[in-house]
Image (spheres, grey):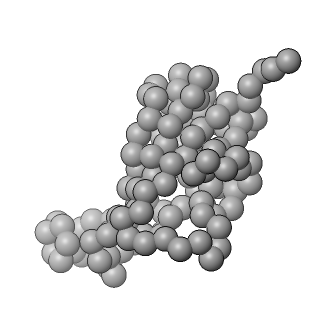
Amino acid sequence: MHGTAIHTCGTHCGERQCDLPAQYDGSMSKITVRYFAAAAEAAGRDAEVLEFASELPSLDDLRSDLVARYGDAIARVLKSGSFLVNGTVRRDGGALVAAGTETGPNDEHTVDVLPAFAGG
């Protein structure tokens, strides 16, 4: 998870160390990542839910996380493809949600990974 620090826990998970931020309040932001066509083939799945205990990652962070998980195959898809974030096509690496957009604890977001489509 991006934006977190290892700390001695005992508060929220009971483990000696976990990767939740020390100020963790129990809320989670969820991103449902759906993969289509070549992206699904590269990831070996059609969808997954990622949870973040801290701030939502940027699209660049999400892209890096997906490459770390699925390697060169997904990197090739992401190089020419795009994201559909909560229904909006995105090709930038910025914030998952626009500045000023109200988000709360336990919000869920959907990110579709779309390969470049051939068309006519």
Q: In which quarter of the image is the N terminus?
A: bottom left
Direction bottom: furthest residue:
23
Direction top: furthest residue:
120
Front residue of this view, candidates 71 and 106 = 106
Where in the figure is residue 22, as x and y percent of width and height? 32, 79
Rendered view: 42 above or below 13: above
Left or right position of 50 against 85: left
Where in the figure is residue 102, as x and y percent of width and height? 53, 74
Rendered view: 23 above or below 27: below
- Residue 102 seen by the camera: yes
Where in the figure is residue 21, as x and y percent of width and height? 36, 74
Q: Who's the residue at 62% across and 55% down the image?
A: 59
The quarter holding residue 23 reads: bottom left
Q: Who's the residue at 41% across and 50% down the image?
A: 50
Left or right position of 53 against 12: right
Where in the figure is residue 81, as x and y percent of width and height? 71, 36
Left or right position of 63 against 32: right
Rendered view: 67 above or below 14: above
Q: In which quarter of the image is the C terminus?
A: top right
